[in-house]
Amino acid sequence: MDRDSHLSRKTVLKAALAAGASVPIAMAGVPALARTARDSGGSPAFTPACDDGDDPTPAQTEGPYFKPNSPRRTSLVDASTQGTRLTVTGYVFGAACLPIANALLDFWQADTNGAYDNSGYRFRGHQFSDAQGRFSLTTVVPGLYPGRTRHLHVKVQAPGRPVLTTQLYFPGEPRNNTDTIFDPELLMAVRTNGPAREASFDFVLNVPQTPGSGRSDRSADRPAGRGHLEGGGGVPGR
Ligand SMILES: [Fe+2]
């Protein structure tokens, strides 16, 4: 199934990016990233996730529970939070597979019992991708509620670009087969690590980029401000 190769390419690219970002001294023995190989005229060792006709990450309905002005934070839990711990990590890429720095990611989800906090901001938080386009969210596995399969909500926005509103899903969920909103393109790769879950997903935004520039948008150089969404993403949902 194409979905499997799709995921594996992303996983390989992510691993390469992570290796390059965290242990550059060890890169002598690690194949170069595709974009590096392309720039140098060599044969790419890795195919970028979005360089072979893969579409940008599809949009999905916002649903009824989005709230603007979420706190800026990468963790939605504390020591007393109930539920199976979940980390979600990945990258934000543009149309040429280059990472997008300072992209806004605004997550919201149900708690472990399937309830949204509509009076406060529990399980709501926004963050910005780092210089390598990476994000990391610490939360819990969202509970089920009537009519839907298990999912996370997120808005993703490159600096100065339109907001992508979408949802992320978990493999192997029985309700994936009956939820009419579910889209397999939005499945995270999820693995179990002891009592916790570790998920990964890379967003591909429809943001023009110049391959080889290493930069998607000059505005990414600006300091991260609060709430890009307030200008265009706070449309009330249903
Ligand atoms: Fe929801």
Image: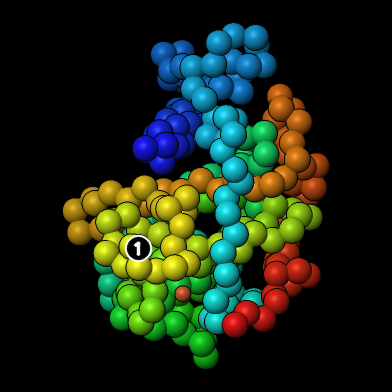
Q: What's the amino acid at mark 1?
A: Asn
Along the line of sight, which residue is nearer the eye, 164 or 127? 164
Q: Position of residue 43 (x, y in %)?
A: 55, 10
The spot of residue 189 in percent (x, y) is 36, 47
Name the spot of residue 198 as percent of width and height, x first. Answer: 33, 52
Query: Can residue 126 be seen at all in this image of the molecule?
Result: no
The residue labelled by disc 1 is 176
In the displayed structure, would residue 225 be above or below residue 64? above
8 and 83: which one is in front? 8
Query: Residue placed at 46% from the left, 13% from the top?
Result: 28
Would you say residue 70 is visible in this rendering? yes
Name the residue at 55% across, 76% down: 63
Residue ID at (80%, 42%): 218
Q: Residues within 10 Å of mark 1 (few under 14, many from 20)?
A: many
Residue 211 in picture, x, y percent from top left: 71, 27
Residue 151's place in the image compared with 52, above or below, is below
The image quadrant where one finds the N terminus is top left
Secondary element at tag 1 = helix
Residue 72 vs residue 4: left or right? right
User: At 28% across and 72% down in the image, what residue appears?
Assistant: 83
